[in-house]
Image (cartoon, helix red, strand yellow):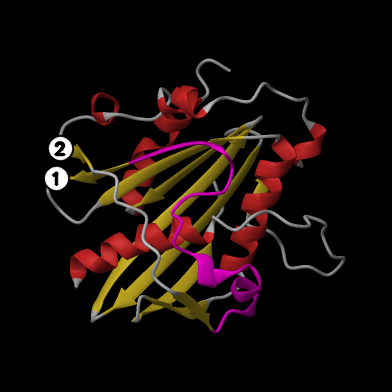
Amino acid sequence: MRVRVATTALGITAAFLAVPACSTSTKPNAAPSARTGSPADTFHKVAMLSSAALETRLLDESDLGSGYLRKPERPTQHDDVTVVGCPALNELGGDAATGGTLTFPRKAKTAFTYGGSSSEISEELYSDSANKLSGGIDRIFDAMTGCPSYQVVAGGTPIDMTSQKLLAPQGLGDEQWGQLLTFSAGGQSIVVKQTAIRDGSLLLIVSGSPALVDRHLDKALAKATAAN
């Protein structure tokens, strides 16, 4: 059960982010966003990158150091997913949460285990217009952090969730988002930290064990934006 919980934690988190962006307007009395930074539409356009170009900007074992092993990419699963206790996520279509990536066509992703343990770190890169990237990720983070606790039933397995908004590192990119998620199932729990940074037409998402995310976030952003 422990391995399944760990795998589900990263998979479902990314899958929720697969919902297409809709309206990004802010209501007058809306709750504060998990986002920090400036609105996307205040920045000039930057050339978008192909998926092949994004692949070259992902972290690899030589960037991470010893003890990291790349996880083989798993086939896309299509288990039924139901969200209980969080209407905002239901409205976003949580029942489709098995894709594992955002729906932007230009994308690349990788994941690693560390030290032969259950500690994991994953990286995702996307490229699109600044407004589309900002609107899509902002809406999902707001929905997830707006529900302190809820339950996800994936493939018949109930997973208890708690979410907490985090202040993302300042001064990185144009906009930042952060959250801490706890997944509990079968008497086991795993904590996943997720940080997203938009830099122009590039979106970086780093997820996994909090210590590993903190250790490699700057390095991931530097490599992703080195040629911008």
Relative height, residue 163 to residue 194 (above, below): below
| Residue 85 screen position, x and y as percent | 55, 84
Magenta region: which residues?
85-110
Question: Which label was assigned to residue 204?
Answer: none
Nearer the observer, 8 or 117: 8
Which residue does the image show at 68% across and 54% down from the upper left?
Answer: 21
Nearer the observer, 150 or 100: 100
In which quadrant of the rendered image does the N terminus lie?
bottom left
**Residues at marks 1 and 2, CA–CA distance in whole angstroms:** 5 Å
**Residue annotated with mark 1:** 115
- Badge 2 local density, few (<14 within 10 Å), some, or many (20+)? few
Answer with left or right where residue 84 lies relative to residue 213.
Answer: right
Can the viewer see residue 38 in this picture?
A: no
**Residue annotated with mark 2:** 67
Which amino acid lies under the numbered mark 2 shown in the image of this protein? Gly
Which amino acid lies under the numbered mark 1 shown in the image of this protein? Gly
| Residue 181 screen position, x and y as percent | 43, 65
Which residue does the image show at 46% across and 24% down from the upper left?
Answer: 52
Relative height, residue 110 to residue 139 (above, below): above
Residue 30, quarter of picture: bottom right
| Residue 94 screen position, x and y as percent | 54, 70
Kindly check if marks 1 and 2 are in contact, taking CB atoms under 8 A apart as contact.
Answer: yes
Nearer the observer, 48 or 24: 48
